[in-house]
Image (cartoon, rainbow, N blue to C red):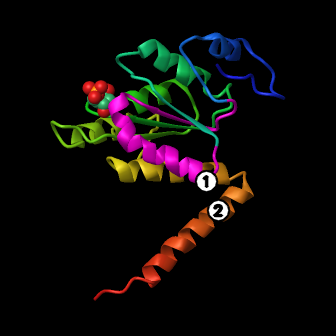
Amino acid sequence: MAAKAKGRKSTKQEAAVVESPELELNAHPLVGVIMGSQSDWETMRHADETLTKFGVAHESRVISAHRSPNIAAEYGSTAEVRGLEVIIAAAGGAAHLAGVMAAHTTLPVLGVPMKSDALNGLDSLLATVQMPGGIPVGTLAIGKPGAVNAALFAVAILANSRPELRKMLHRFREEQEAKIRATTLT
Ligand code: RP5
């Protein structure tokens, strides 16, 4: 069960989340990583690991837009008051989870399309990216690269007001460049 955030006013909405037996949340996550199914975790663990690498407090959990619509609505509509600043939402097939989140919050929502058996993720990509004007979802690549980049994008958003994260991002880019410089072909 989540601890109440210190220094923030408790509101009715927050109390609803804290008391909900459905939601097990970390103390003060800044990023919410949600996915439509346990089967998405193999991919989305890369978002989780990337956020951990940058020391960003986050929570990861399964929420389905169609199998658990009430939990999805509650999560999206209480995200802001709980102190989340970014939501990463991954889903496959008719992948409307990110769109549903964006419908319930004005926080930035980053969508990660999952590879699907039937269409290799093209269905997930189109379902996530093709939002009608007015409710934006920032959509990343299909699968693992999207999971990693969604986390890096979240870090970049948080870095706007956190200089230490900005420094870490610069270092991360420098390391990538150093690896390229050191690469030789035989
Ligand atoms: C979506 O359907 C999930 O996001 C997942 O990518 C896909 C398949 O889910 P499972 O049938 O593996 O639970 O809801």
How far apart marks 1 and 2 lie (CA) works out to 7 Å
Q: State which region is magenta.
A: 27-56
Q: Position of residue 44 (x, y in %)?
A: 41, 41
Residue type at tag 1: Phe
Residue 140 seen in this snapshot:
no
Image-quadrant location for residue 15: top right
The residue drawn where x is 69% and y is 33% is: 28
Mark 2 residue CB less than 8 A from any atom of ligand 1: no
Residue underneath mark 1: 54
Determine whether label 1 and label 2 are within 8 Å by CB. yes
Mark 1 residue CB less than 8 A from any atom of ligand 1: no
Q: Position of residue 58 (x, y in %)?
A: 60, 38
Helix, strand or loop for disc 1: loop
Q: Position of residue 70 (x, y in %)?
A: 46, 12
Magenta span has 46? yes
Q: Is residue 30 left or right of residue 131?
A: right
> In front: 81, or 167?
167
> In front: 131, or 145?
145
